[in-house]
Image (spheres, coloured by chain):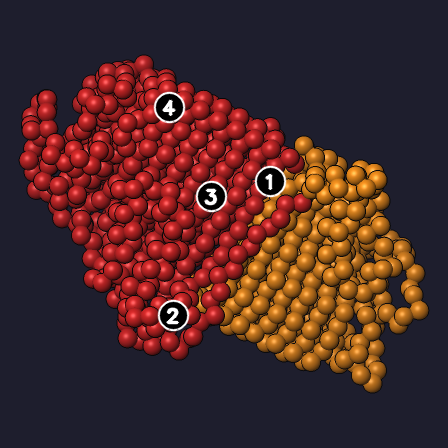
């Protein structure tokens, strides 16, 4: 009989003390921080007409000079999408999206062909500079290869030559369609089929760009790969598609970051990410998501409806998702692992922070199909303001997954008495020779700890920041160096106002 | 599914009472629950229609309680059989609720019923005739243990309803036994209303026979400082569903739940619980155990709702499951919805099989494998069985469970 581990975070608090804090609006100040990536780049863009129909899809495909199989893929997905209904099971409250009121393709106007970064519009470079993304050559020192996606298209990918020496392909998906068509045809849609769900079908029909990574057999990618997504237009949706293939015994670490300007309208972001790991391969996918979350009244913000899924096809393959979700008005995202190969491993580490009227419904699915597969889930949710933060997860052990093992932990922290934290773990087992453990707890900032830290001369805000940081430590430890620092900073910014 | 047709055409029951009319009206446009809803999604469709396939029967066949009454002064009642109930002693009184009181209370309940979520309750009340509704009002202390039976009749669908009011400062031990007869369906709904400072130790033992089905729903409302302890056991049903809804209407109450379901062959038994904290300082300790063998399917879904008003709630929920066969299935879904910030809430879930190391140890001491598994199982069962009050020894529950294995 498996042991159960249930952890309790004691929340024996001095009510009076916190009440005073609330009265003095201290907590409120602490969780309030303006969005600093909210600027708009004034750049000429090429947009197509609003609306969605077969002609628009043909137009997107034509603009990208795609082969016929891809157009067929899009049209098939569109047909499926038309027959589907927008899902409502998550119980997220948002205004009906008018899919005919969205621009499905928007690209910054630039010279026909770019041979080097010097030819990229300086305004664009400036934008990414402002966002702290190293695109220009002098920033090479950071040793991270970046693919920058602006609205619908990828504008630059750095470090290509160095990567090519190792046989690593890292480019935008449109380029991959042209240059590595065989790989795209073989793998696109194999992890997330075009009719998988409503938003995946929409993405399959209209996806404009995204990143493509191919790591050949036996290669350990010499540097971290990174893509940076920036939404600039207020009326265009972003539908990017990422495909990562790790051949036998290869490994790669991939980072993803996102920001958007402040608009008082909601922008739709429906991405699809597919990962494929063959024998002994390992993929680490990290996200720091900081889309614009809307203002305090919940006006504006990004609707982030993303389908992310990895397939551990090979024996002893490993896919690890780590994410820090701080932005978006609504996040609806379940990075999942299909564990097919024997002894394959799936991991999910997540921190989700919601404030004001943000809603986050995030979690993971671990589908154990192969024997001796293992998965670990660590999810930390922090909700402040009037936000709703839910963990929704599925662990499924199939009949052939003998010796499968899963451990899940989801902890929630509530700041203020208006926020809500929900957990919906769902466990299904059809294999007796497997072990599944799940634990969840909910707590608030402990007054004892706060008092202790303050008595040692640490400021209130700093003390809260330390405690939140400690609460998220398990997840931050899993992030790559650059991201860990960024995530810590981001959380501090979101939570601590000017102090932190 | 003749019954559903009868509901649609309103020909199910003659001489309808007012309550039956209201419930049938609620069901008429949508007589079946939505199979896609979270609440019914995992319900096996053919087994569910099996539940509805027996013709509805208001009358009971002759029924003998399988165990003789022991010398102890236990009060025994069978729903549908007792006419005038009145026990008035020095320390306590047990009286039947008047028709008005009963109607008023049930109507209040129906008012907040949702077609999908409370479908079992609505069906039950549509079918229960006045004779099959037992309403009691209990008052006082030193009350002897009470046993209440309900049973089905073969080749028919029977519906029984039990309503109990516990008045202030009252302390009761009550065992409810639901017996499924071969080839039959039983719909049982129970309503408890616990007034301030009252305490109820409630046991539910449901066991069926070959191909019997059960739809058991339990609705509890707890007032301040009341304590409700539930020990439940469901086994040997082709299809059984146990729905528990507990509401701590103004907080400051204690709830302990220990439930177990055992499925074998191709059975499906599910437990759905919903605990609502509607005031501060509520306490909940819940453990649910499932054991699934052969080709069976055990389901547990538990939701805990802590709104803003329910500060200082302390709730824990644990689901422990044993999966003993390659073809069996277990689904478990604990669920926490929390808005209040000053709370202690936790839940845990495990699914595993018998511990091999423990088995190995026992075998190395000369205990045979079947005996060693029995020992392990008995400790697994014991935690729940020891929580079921009243005459559990006489029922030999542990033996029954182990020897069936």
Q: Marks 1 and 2: same chain?
A: yes
| Residue that numbered label 2 is attached to | A452
| Residue that numbered label 4 is attached to | A250
Q: Is residue B192 visible?
A: yes
Q: Is residue B79 visible?
A: no
Which numbered marker is on residue B168?
none
- Residue B205: x and y in percent read 77, 56
Placement of A211 over or under B65, stated as above or below: above
**Front residue of this view, candidates B402 and B125:** B402
Question: Cα distance, mark 2 to mark 3?
Answer: 31 Å
Q: Earlier in the sequence, mark 4 or mark 3?
A: 4
Q: Are marks 1 and 2 in contact (CB under 8 Å)?
A: no
Q: Earlier in the sequence, mark 2 or mark 3?
A: 3
| Residue that numbered label 1 is attached to | A435
Which residue is found at the position 67% from the left and 50% from the top? B289
Q: Earlier in the sequence, mark 3 or mark 1?
A: 3
Chain represented in red: A
| Residue that numbered label 3 is attached to | A377
SS for tag 4?
loop
SS for tag 2?
helix
Number of the front mark, 4 or 3:
4
Chain B colour is orange
């Amino acid at each position: 009989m498996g042991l159960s581990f249930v952890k309790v975070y004691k929340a024996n608090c001095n009510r009076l003390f916190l009440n005073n804090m609330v009265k003095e609006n201290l907590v409120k100040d602490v969780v309030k921080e303006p969005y600093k990536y909210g600027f708009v780049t004034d750049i000429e863009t090429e947009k197509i007409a609003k609306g969605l129909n077969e002609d628009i899809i043909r137009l997107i495909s034509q603009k990208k000079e795609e082969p016929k199989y891809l157009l067929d893929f899009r049209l098939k997905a569109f047909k499926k999408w038309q027959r589907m209904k927008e899902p409502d099971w998550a119980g997220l409250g948002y205004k009906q999206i008018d899919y005919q009121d969205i621009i499905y393709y928007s690209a910054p106007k630039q010279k026909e062909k770019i041979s080097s970064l010097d030819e990229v519009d300086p305004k664009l470079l400036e934008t990414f500079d402002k966002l702290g993304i190293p695109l220009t050559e002098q920033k090479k020192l950071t040793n991270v290869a970046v693919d920058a996606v602006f609205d619908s298209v990828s504008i630059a990918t750095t470090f290509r030559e160095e990567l090519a020496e190792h046989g690593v392909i890292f480019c935008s998906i449109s380029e991959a369609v042209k240059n590595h068509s065989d790989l795209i045809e073989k793998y696109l849609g194999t992890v997330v089929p075009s009719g998988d769900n409503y938003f995946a079908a929409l993405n399959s029909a209209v996806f404009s760009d995204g990143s493509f990574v191919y790591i050949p057999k036996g290669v350990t990618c010499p540097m971290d790969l990174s893509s940076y997504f920036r939404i600039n237009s207020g009326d265009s949706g972003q539908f990017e598609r990422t495909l990562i293939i790790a051949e036998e015994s290869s490994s790669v670490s991939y980072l993803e970051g996102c920001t958007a300007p402040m608009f008082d309208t909601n922008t739709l972001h429906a991405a699809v990410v597919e990962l494929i790991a063959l024998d002994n391969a390992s993929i680490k996918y990290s996200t720091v998501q900081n889309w614009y979350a809307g203002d305090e009244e919940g006006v504006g913000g990004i609707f982030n409806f993303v389908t992310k899924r990895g397939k551990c096809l090979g024996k002893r393959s490993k896919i690890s998702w780590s994410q820090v979700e701080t932005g978006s008005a609504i996040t609806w995202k379940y990075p999942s692992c299909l564990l097919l190969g024997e002894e394959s491993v799936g991991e999910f580490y997540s921190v989700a922070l919601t404030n004001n009227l943000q809603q986050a419904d995030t979690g993971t699915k671990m589908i154990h199909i192969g024997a001796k597969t293992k998965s670990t889930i660590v999810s930390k949710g922090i909700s402040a303001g009037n936000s709703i933060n839910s963990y929704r997860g599925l662990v499924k052990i199939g009949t052939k997954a003998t010796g499968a093992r899963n451990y899940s932990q989801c902890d929630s922290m509530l700041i203020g008495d208006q926020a809500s934290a929900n957990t919906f773990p769902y466990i299904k087992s059809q294999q007796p020779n497997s072990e599944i453990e799940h634990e969840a707890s909910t707590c608030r900032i402990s007054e004892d700890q706060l008092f202790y830290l303050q008595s040692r001369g640490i400021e209130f805000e700093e003390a809260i920041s330390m405690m939140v940081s400690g609460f998220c430590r398990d997840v931050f430890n899993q992030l790559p160096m650059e991201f860990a620092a960024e995530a810590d900073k981001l959380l501090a910014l979101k939570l601590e106002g000017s102090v932190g | 599914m003749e019954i559903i047709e009868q509901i649609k055409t309103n020909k199910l029951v003659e001489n309808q009472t007012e309550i039956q009319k209201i419930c049938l009206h609620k069901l008429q446009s949508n007589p079946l629950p939505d199979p896609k809803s979270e609440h019914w999604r995992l319900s096996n469709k053919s087994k569910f229609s099996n539940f509805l396939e027996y013709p509805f029967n208001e009358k009971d066949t002759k029924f003998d309680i399988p165990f003789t009454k022991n010398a102890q002064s236990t009060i025994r009642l069978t729903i549908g059989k007792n006419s005038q109930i009145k026990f008035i002693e020095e320390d306590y009184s047990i009286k039947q609720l008047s028709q008005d009181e009963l109607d008023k209370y049930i109507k209040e309940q129906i008012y907040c019923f949702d077609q999908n979520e409370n479908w079992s309750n609505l069906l039950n009340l549509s079918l229960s005739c006045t004779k099959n509704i037992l309403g009691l009002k209990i008052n006082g202390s030193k009350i002897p243990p009470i046993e209440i039976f309900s049973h089905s009749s073969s080749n028919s669908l029977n519906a029984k309803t039990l309503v109990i009011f516990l008045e202030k400062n009252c302390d009761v031990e009550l065992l409810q036994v639901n017996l499924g007869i071969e080839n039959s369906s039983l719909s049982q709904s129970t309503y408890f209303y616990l007034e301030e400072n009252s305490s109820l130790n409630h046991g539910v033992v449901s066991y069926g026979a070959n191909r019997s089905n059960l739809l058991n729903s339990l609705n509890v409302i707890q007032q301040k400082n009341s304590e409700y302890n539930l020990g439940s056991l469901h086994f040997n049903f082709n299809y059984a569903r146990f729905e528990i809804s507990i509401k701590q209407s103004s907080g400051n109450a204690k709830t302990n739940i220990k439930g177990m379901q055992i499925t074998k062959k191709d059975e499906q038994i599910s437990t759905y619980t919903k605990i609502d904290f509607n005031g501060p300082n509520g306490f909940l300790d819940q453990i649910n155990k499932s054991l699934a063998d052969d080709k069976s399917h055990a389901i547990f879904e538990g939701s805990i709702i802590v709104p803003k008003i329910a500060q200082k709630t302390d709730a824990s929920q644990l689901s422990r499951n044993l999966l003993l066969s390659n073809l069996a299935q277990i689904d478990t879904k604990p669920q926490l919805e929390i808005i209040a910030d000053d709370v202690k809430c936790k839940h845990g879930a495990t699914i595993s099989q018998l511990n091999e190391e423990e088995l190995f140890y026992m075998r190395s001491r000369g205990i045979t494998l079947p005996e060693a598994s029995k020992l392990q199982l008995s400790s697994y069962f014991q935690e729940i069985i020891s929580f079921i009050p009243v005459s559990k020894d006489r029922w030999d529950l542990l033996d029954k469970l182990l020897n069936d294995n």
